[in-house]
Amino acid sequence: MTDQTIFCDIAFDFDNVIHQYSQGWKDGQIYDPPMRHCEKVLDKLYKDYKLCIFTTRENLASVMSWLRKYNLDKYFKHVTNKKPVAKMYVDDRAVHFDDWLSFYAKFDEHIKLLYEK
């Protein structure tokens, strides 16, 4: 689980997708349990798909430690802080892109939601 070019079927963001992240960054601590139903769904997916985690966190050892604590490490082939090559990305802050005009039409709605939190 090191940083080279990583290929996976589904790449999951860590904070607010795997880790609840209820208090935001909080000095980089990983303080919450997994998101509700996370393990149940991962258990179904990993049988047929290669899963990985991507995060902006620099301390990947702390992410791995947290995954082991909750017995989630078995589901992921890689953990990285560089965007992997994947067929699908699951990220709480992503905006689906079709084309520039439809993106811009959705932009105001998404930016408002981001700053309301």
Image (cartoon, grey):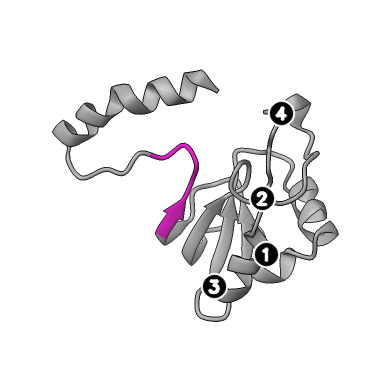
Q: Secondary structure at mark 1?
A: helix
Q: Are marks 2 and 1 in contact (CB under 8 Å)?
A: no
Labels 4 and 3: the sequence-earlier one? 4
Label 2 belongs to which residue?
Answer: 35
Amino acid type, mark 3: Leu
Q: Which tag is nearer the camera, tag 2 or tag 3?
A: 2
Labels 1 and 3: the sequence-earlier one? 1
Name the outermost residue toward the bottom: 47
Which residues, given as a range, are shown in magenta?
Answer: 88-94
Amino acid type, mark 1: Glu
The residue positioned 55% from the left and 66% from the top of the image is 51
Amino acid type, mark 4: Gln
Q: Position of residue 15 (x, y in %)?
A: 63, 42
Q: Residues within 10 Å of mark 3 (few under 14, many from 20)?
A: some
Distance from label 4 to label 3 (Cα)? 28 Å
Distance from label 2 to label 1 (Cα)? 8 Å
Distance from label 1 to label 4 (Cα)? 21 Å
